[in-house]
Image: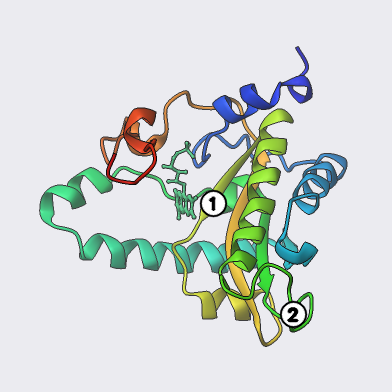
Amino acid sequence: MCAAELSVYEAIRTRRDVRAEFTGEPVDDATLWRMLEAAHRAPSVGNSQPWDFVVVRDPSTLRKFADHVADKRVEFRAGLPAERAATFEPIKIEGIIESGTGIVVSYDHDRGGPQVLGRATVPETGVYSAVLAIQNLWLAATAEGVGVGWVSFYDPEFLTDLVGLPDGIRPIAWLCVGPVHEFQQTPDLERFGWRTRRPLHDAVHHETYRA
Ligand SMILES: Cc1cc2nc3c(=O)[nH]c(=O)nc-3n(C[C@H](O)[C@H](O)[C@H](O)COP(=O)(O)O)c2cc1C
């Protein structure tokens, strides 16, 4: 079966956060555009579409970001107790260079004007909308056989400067995007013993949270 014919359930099941499986080939422009179209079709509070996508392929920008992320990884590791640090050590947390393409997803709280329908009492709904665009992109990428890895080991100010986000526009994610030779069947954090997923039964409640 052609990867792009995956059912939505199959795409949800096979989607992985990818770090080590990028082939090193860049994603082609037509595929990338289809993924961005999928992202741009996401639901958004008040139809505000508060997202933008900065596609980064300049090797010097990828290198600068990778160096920054490496520093943040060291800082995180330094704050861990010895046993957790040992578990963390072999875990790869990004594929910035190998993927060849970064997509910075940004959020504009002013998009949609002062009265965004549905955001008055829950301001976070704007960011939720941008995250839904990311999930659409992630699933579309999976259907295309393209890997996505979300990187959040960065200082927002650094990334804002790196890709020239204007005042008031926040970075929400750096996504490493590229073809993969395989999708792992088990999340890396589980494979490396950092944290396992919990059963659905534990997450579903009836009538009240405590039930
Ligand atoms: C908001 C967010 C931030 C994340 N940041 C990172 C990151 O900085 N580095 C990384 O390797 N994975 C990151 N991930 C991926 C998660 O570790 C991954 O989704 C989780 O372990 C489950 O694995 P799976 O996506 O393969 O199912 C992030 C995921 C989300 C949703």
What percent of the width, then of the height, locates residue 108?
Answer: 70, 75
Q: In which quarter of the image is residue 144?
A: top right
User: What is the secondary structure assignment of the residue under circle 2?
Assistant: loop
- Residue for point 73% across, 53% down: 43
Residue at the spot 79% in from the left edge and 62% down from the top edge: 47
Q: Distance between the residues labelled 2 and 1?
A: 31 Å
Q: Using residue 110 as the reference point, say whether residue 13 is left or right of it.
A: left
Quick one: which residue is furthest to the top in this view? 1
Image quadrant in which the C terminus is located: top left
Residue in the image at 62% along x and 32% along y: 180
Amino acid type of the residue that numbered disc 2 sits on in the rendered structure: Gln
* Residue 142 drawn at (x, y percent): 66, 32
User: Is residue 60 at all visible to an observer of this figure?
Assistant: no
Nearest the camera: 187 or 28?
Answer: 187
Which residue position holds label 2?
115
Residue named by callout 1: 150
* Image point (79%, 75%), residue name: 112
Which numbered marker is on residue 167? none
* Quadrant position of the N terminus in the picture: top right
Callout in the foreground (2, 1): 2
Q: Nearer the viewer, residue 41 or 3?
A: 41
